[in-house]
Amino acid sequence: IIDDDLDVLEALGSFLKSKGYHIHTHASGYHVPDIVKGYNPDIILLDVELSEVIGTDVCKELKKKFNIPIIIMSGHRYKSIHECNADAYISKPFNLIGLIDKINFHLNTPIAMGKKAQKILVVDDEVEILHVVEDILKIKGYDVIKHSNGLNVHEIISIFKPDLILLDVQISGIKGTDICTNIKKISAIPVILFSAHADLQKTYQECNADAFIAKPFDIEHLLNEISKHLNSEDVPKVFKLKRNKGNFGKDSDSEAENIITDKTITNTDLGVLK
């Protein structure tokens, strides 16, 4: 936990210790890479409003040197999470249940678990969406290939051998549902459909897709769906996280009343996928 507010460090550190995590705190933005290298944490909570240095610059530097999930914290609504390559944002004062959920979520990504990157094929004829989704998934540790039309999808699948496919329902020139149906005839690869028209949700069952997400979609919901379908039979029993044995991840109402209200990062916040 990196924060120059000693009260936050003490309160947050004590709370996370009570949930079974091993905690290391640092009350300055200086020498952070050296501390990270020495302690080798499984996740970093970083305040972006440090008095001595710019927290986003610290985040960028850490992301260049380490493959570790970073959750940035701020007393103001922060919309540039994508610019500093942070994995998540949480606002102060925060809801402790939301913070624990976010920590546990990001400890289940390939980055956090030190696993070989799982491969995701993204098919959409909206180039902006392709680039944004690619960037987000790469930050999460996934290997991504993007394809901007519905042609030659089967060839790409045979070459790339994805672990999961994100497929737009309304691709110009061909129906995404037809592509999905053909994929499912020859493969058990999970397919998540998405569309700007929520009324098409019923169609995903007709083409044997595994899930449907409406645009503009909530980034964290998308990541949850991806994780669910990639890891349904691959749930890790032990995290690399330095945590003690115990019942972490469950908060009592009294513990959760005080510190932060977390709000999910959406595509609207990022200014894309409108």
Image (spheres, rainbow, N blue to C red):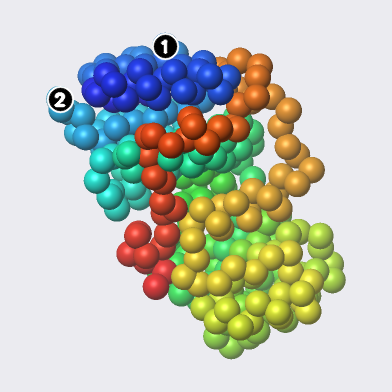
Query: Looking at the image, which is closer to me, 252 or 204?
Result: 252
Give the vertical position of 217 relative to 182 (above or below): above
- How far apart, in angstroms, are the residues tagged by discs 2 and 1? 22 Å
x and y percent of residue 203 in the render?
71, 80
Residue in the picture at 69% in, 24% down: 238
Tell me the kind of residue under disc 2: Glu
Asked whether residue 40 appears in the rendered view, the answer is no
Residue picked out by circle 2: 52
Instruction: Quarter of the image for the N terminus: give it.
Output: top left
Residue 93 is situated, as x and y percent measured from the top left of the image, at 33, 39
Placement of 55 over or under 81, stated as above or below? above
Picture quadrant where residue 157 is located = bottom right
Q: Which residue is denoted by mark 1 in the rendering?
A: 38
Left or right: residue 125 compared with residue 56: right
Image mark count: 2
Q: Is residue 224 left or right of residue 63?
A: right
Q: Residue at x 60, y 32 (%)?
A: 250
Instruction: Tell me the SS state at disc 1.
Output: helix
